[in-house]
Image (cartoon, rainbow, N blue to C red):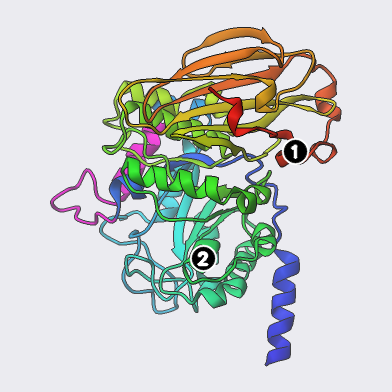
Amino acid sequence: MFIIWCLVMSIIGGTFTLDNGLARTPPMGWLAWERFRCNTDCKNDPDNCISDQLFRTMTDLVVDEGYADVGYEYVNIDDCWMEKDRAPNGDILPDRQRFPYGLKSLSDYIHSKGLKFGIYGDYGNYTCAGYPGVLGYMGNDAASFAAWDVDYVKLDGCYANPHEMDQGYPEFGFHLNRTGRQMIYSCSWPVYQIYAGIKPNFTAIIHHCNLWRNYDDIQDSWSSLESIIDYYGNNQDNIVPNAGPGHWNDPDMLIIGNFGLSYEQSKTQMALWAILAAPLLMSVDLRTIRPEYKAILQNRKIIAVDQDPLGIQGRRIYKHKGIEIWARPITPIYQSYYSYAIAFLNRRTDGTPSDVSVTLKELGLQYPGGYRVEDLYEDVDYGVLSPETKIKVKVNPSGIVILRCDIQRVNSFVSRARYTEFSPLHEVFNVRQNSFK
């Protein structure tokens, strides 16, 4: 039996690899969980329960309200879509009352609108809300997802043994791969191991998953968002190297347009998620979102930073007295020089905007020919600035200013450049604490 198991695992390891051609930039779409949670009361709350109607409505709005035009393409179900019991043959079933036409019909509808369909499972006996998990039924569930033309699978980790995840997550990936249908594979593998005091094997995680969770679920509050910002900043040396085309760190959903974030704080999440090369998965009621929050979510210039083809995750390069500076190398590139997205974050609560003044050179921007600098929220063009130029920004409390600094000499050089030719990020970001005033 042991020999058979080893053979199976060697097949799994060799068959399901990250190089599945998917998620070359961070996935973008809409996800139900943060806004609609596990509301299954369609009798008393038919417009907001987890149901076929809800997902068709949101699909229509993603297209009709312009979200698809700027890159949002997935419509993802999260927990609570299932019957509490499996079919006699072990197949998983959508709730018959809330999804009366089945998930293939819903998938067909989403695809008919030019979008893609995502679904949720759990590597455990149960999902977090108590519905059937995939343990013991991996082949059944993978086959069902493929039959429903699923494009994206999130596998949670409730009611599971974290010590078994090094085998279990690759095994489910193997079953997904064996169906012959390409599906993005989103794992909660590392976060449950971190909770259990286990050091995740990110070499294996990168090999088997397209994206993964590292930290707590986001809640609808500024304090929750701050805790995620701190986690990614404080642990960036271990987190940043794992990101790249086809494999991404996932700091969780965008909560912009809900109840817990102010306008300034919403701008902060969008800008920092772009710096982090994070998946952009909105979780908001698209029927009622206010125009100013919709504009944040549809900011094409910030989305372009998030979707930059280099796929290099940004870093926090300065933190002092409530002021933080985050930077991400992006295209265009020339010789040994990157362009950059730079974010100035004000964590202070003293009620007045803070001035931050710094030269481009102090930020690590040293290309002699200079950079064209643009504010991505205010649409202010600073023109071409030399590395010695001092730039001054005014940042609102709990707010952010994000700049794009593009090298001017590009043309044919971009296609010939390779990321491996350039200096490590900790050398590029040679920033001193006393450089900023």
Tell me the element at label 2. Answer: helix
Pick whichever of labels 2 and 1 is earlier in the sequence: 2
Q: Which residue is mark 2?
A: 194
Name the foreground residue: 329 vs 396: 396
For the point 71% across and 59% down, the residue is 17
Mark sitting on residue 407: none
Q: Is residue 25 visible?
A: yes
Q: Position of residue 286 (x, y in %)?
A: 33, 33
Tell me the element at label 1. Answer: helix
Amino acid type, callout 2: Ile
- Disc 1 crowd, CA 10 A, few/some/many (<14, 14-19, 20+): few
Is residue 66 found left or right of 214 in the rendered image?
left
Amino acid type, callout 1: Glu
Q: Position of residue 226 (x, y in %)?
A: 40, 43
401 vs 306: above or below: above
Q: Position of residue 151 (x, y in %)?
A: 55, 50
Name the foreground residue: 7 vs 398: 398
Q: Position of residue 273 (x, y in %)?
A: 51, 37
Q: Which residue is mark 1?
A: 427
**Dividing the picture into quarters, in which one does residue 436 lie?**
top right
Magenta residues span: 38-62
Is residue 337 found left or right of 60 in the rendered image?
right
65 vs 24: above or below: above
* Mark 2 vs mark 1, CA separation in Å: 29 Å
Residue 366 lies in the magenta stretch: no
For the point 13% across and 51% down, the residue is 44
For the point 74% across and 81% down, the residue is 7
